[in-house]
Image (cartoon, rainbow, N blue to C red):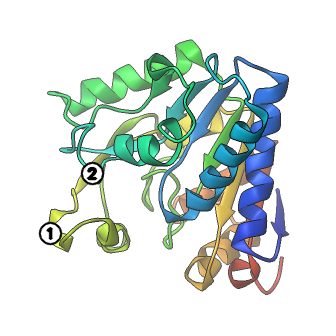
């Protein structure tokens, strides 16, 4: 695993956008694992710009999002369905909605929905590039500390720190869902290539723990040391003092 400091969020976001662009350019049936959250906004904006300037055909691209809140339907403004529509799928027309996959947050049985999504990943995968962010507590996807490394897509109880971090997307902290459906750690590790982005001083500790190389479920992201093709891109503020 190599942690690369690209200086600024803007530069790192553009670099990763070009990697996704090149993946689609060279393989029109690319399968992309996508993430949400504030870390990803400028990356998706840069990707939309690249796609638009080159009018790249994305109709054969298949996407798989990491997670979705339980209790939020696809039309809810804070759902990850809406996030992806607002920042990518509606900004660059051409993605086939039937090929853009997210867990169903209002499925009658979340456990059955998790199983369905994992089966879909196995049937359609493996993902060519999986994009990841990282939580302040080292989570990836919604796999909180203590999540078994063998976990597959599952129902997750969100920690207080994760609820607090995501409360900025809701009118009130009490509106933040307490559970989600998330790809598991083993699900994420099936990807051929993994790219993790982390920006800002609040992510420095998590990246420092990742850089230390000690593999532990207390810091779920450390499982990435067991993957043969992982790249981590940070800005100055998130770069650990010792790598």
Disc 1/disc 2 C-alpha distance (Å) = 16 Å
Query: Which element type, helix, strand or loop, lies under badge 2?
Result: loop
Residue 93 locus on image (x, y percent): 54, 30
In this rendering, is residue 119 above or below 224?
above
The number of callouts visible is 2
Q: From the image, tell me which residue sits under label 2.
A: 77
> Which mark sits nearer the N-terminus, 1 or 2?
2
Is 50 in front, or is 64? 50
Name the residue at 55% across, 59% down: 41
| Viewer-nearest of discs 1 and 2 | 2
In this rendering, is residue 150 above or below 117?
below
Name the residue at 54% across, 66% down: 138
Determine whether, in the image, residue 12 is placed left or right of residue 179.
right
Residue 237 locus on image (x, y percent): 69, 84
Image quadrant in which the C terminus is located = bottom right
Query: Which element type, helix, strand or loop, lies under badge 1?
Result: helix
Q: From the image, tell me which residue sits under label 1.
A: 174
Name the residue at 64% across, 16% down: 60
Residue 145 locus on image (x, y percent): 45, 62
């Amino acid at each position: 695993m190599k942690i690369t400091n690209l200086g600024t969020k803007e530069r790192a976001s553009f670099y990763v956008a070009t990697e996704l662009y090149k993946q689609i350019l060279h393989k029109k049936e690319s399968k992309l694992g996508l993430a949400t959250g504030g870390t990803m906004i400028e990356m998706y904006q840069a990707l939309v710009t690249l796609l638009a300037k080159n009018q790249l055909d994305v109709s054969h691209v298949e996407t798989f999002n990491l997670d979705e809140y339980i209790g939020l339907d696809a039309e809810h403004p804070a759902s990850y369905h809406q996030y992806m529509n607002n920042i990518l799928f509606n900004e660059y027309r051409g993605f086939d909605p039937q090929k853009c996959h997210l867990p169903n947050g209002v499925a009658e049985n979340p456990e059955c929905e998790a199983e369905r999504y994992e089966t879909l990943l196995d049937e359609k995968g493996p993902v060519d590039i999986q994009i990841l962010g990282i939580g302040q507590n080292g989570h990836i996807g919604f796999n909180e500390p203590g999540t078994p490394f063998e976990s597959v897509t599952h129902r997750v109880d969100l920690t207080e720190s994760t609820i607090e971090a995501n409360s900025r997307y809701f009118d009130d902290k009490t509106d933040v869902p307490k559970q989600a459906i998330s790809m598991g750690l083993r699900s994420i590790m099936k990807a051929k290539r993994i790219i993790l982005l982390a920006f800002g001083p609040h992510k420095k500790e998590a990246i420092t723990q990742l850089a230390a190389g000690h593999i532990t479920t207390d810091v779920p992201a450390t499982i990435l040391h067991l993957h043969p093709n992982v790249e981590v891109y940070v800005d100055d503020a998130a770069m650990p003092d010792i790598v």
